[in-house]
Image (cartoon, rainbow, N blue to C red):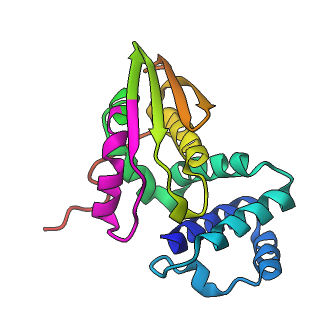
Amino acid sequence: MNGLINRAIEGFVRDGYGDALWSEVVGELALDEAAFEPLMPCAPEVTERLVAALAARLRRAPDDLLEDLGTYLVSQPRTEAVRRLLRFGGVDFEDFLHSLEDLPGRARLAMPEFSLPEIRLHADAAGRYRVEPGACPQAGLRLGPVLVGLLRAMADDYGALVLIEPRGPAIEVRLLDAAHADARAFDLAAGPVPR
């Protein structure tokens, strides 16, 4: 799983900050290419060191960097498969929120070697939700901040106006307007249909 996570971090850094920064950080940490092979096992400590080094180099908090990674995973053409997997969760943002508990299972269908932690959704009142991501120490990073970025990007994708606030290990989501803006186009059958 960590090879896949490290590969996502690599794409995020190369696309957002350039190849030179990526090469410098990987060189300083003396990481070999096996750490970035999606299907190869990799120690969680490698991912922890990578995130810490990038955050220090960019003078950013690690959680802020991870939140940006979550946004990147939904918003970049390179990671369109992630967006498509998430958009299967519903026709609007509220449906998507209700599908979050199914996300680890859907991810396993797409990639059996990728194990997401359990996600719990609690509806507190009309338009108010609490998302509780489970712990995933084998990932080598805190998935909560990644999920915050992912939720923000998905709200934009659906055209919803939301307020998203991390609250300890949980994430508070307030849906202010489900149809605030036009949703980004999404076609269930992308590409030609085979005959």
Instruction: Tell me which residue sits at (62%, 66%) in the image.
Output: 11
Residue at 35%, 58% in the rendered image: 107
Asked if residue 187 is among those painted magenta in the image, a careful observer would answer no
Vertical placement of residue 35 versus 120, above or below = below
Q: Nearer the viewer, residue 107 or 78?
A: 107
Query: Residue at the location (42% across, 56% down)?
Result: 116
Q: Tell me if residue 101 comes above or below residue 138 in the rendering.
A: above
Q: x and y percent of residue 16 in the render? A: 72, 58
Left/right placement of residue 109 relative to residue 113 reads left
Q: Nearer the viewer, residue 137 or 188?
A: 137
Q: Residue furthest left?
A: 195
Q: Is 151 or 187 nearer to us in this picture?
A: 151
Q: Position of residue 78 (x, y in %)?
A: 53, 62
With 13 as the anchor, is 166 left or right in this view? Answer: left
**Span colored in magenta:** 98-121
Q: Position of residue 84 (x, y in %)?
A: 38, 52
Residue 46: x and y in percent read 66, 73
Residue at the spot 50% in from the left edge and 51% down from the top edge: 135
Q: Is residue 190 left or right of residue 156?
A: left
Q: Is residue 105 magenta?
A: yes
Vertical position of residue 134 compared to residue 177: above or below: below
The count of marks equals 0
| Image quadrant in which the C terminus is located | bottom left
